[in-house]
Image: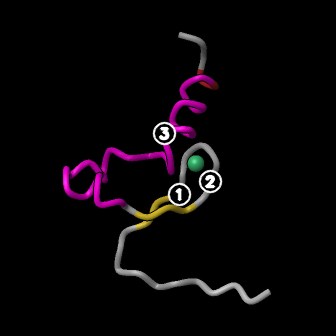
Amino acid sequence: MGRTVPRSPAQTKECLHCGRPFADRKRWASRGQWEAVHYCSVKCRAAARRARGPA
Ligand SMILES: [Zn+2]
């Protein structure tokens, strides 16, 4: 299985929950929220919040 690592100009971060690298999305970039994004998906975001402690 050849795994190629694409070199994209887009910024990437590692999800604080699952540790997977993810790139910025138009949605975040357009709103300038990329710096505030710490999770690859809302799913991880929710899971991380739940893991931190029940509200
Ligand atoms: Zn994640």
Image coordinates for residue 38, horizontal then vertical, percent: 44, 46
Above or below, comparing residue 31 to residue 49 in the picture: below
Task: Verify CB contact (< 8 Å) between mark 3 and mark 1.
Answer: no
Indicate the secondary structure of the residue bearing disc 1: strand
Residue assigned mark 3: 42
Quarter of the rendering containing residue 30? bottom left
Q: Distance between the residues labelled 3 and 1?
A: 14 Å
Residue shown at the point (60%, 23%) measured from the top left: 50
Residue assigned mark 2: 19
Above or below, comparing residue 48 to residue 53 in the picture: below
Q: Residue 40 in magenta?
A: yes
In this rendering, which labeled residue sits more in front, label 3 or label 2?
3
Residue shown at the point (50%, 46%) measured from the top left: 41
Image coordinates for residue 34, horizontal then vertical, percent: 31, 53
Residue kind at label 3, given as amino acid type? Val
Which label was assigned to residue 41? none
Q: Would you say 51 lies left or right of 1 here?
A: left
Residue kind at label 2, given as amino acid type? Gly
Residue kind at label 1, given as amino acid type? Glu
Q: Would you say 11 lies left or right of 7 here?
A: left
In front: 41, or 50?
A: 41
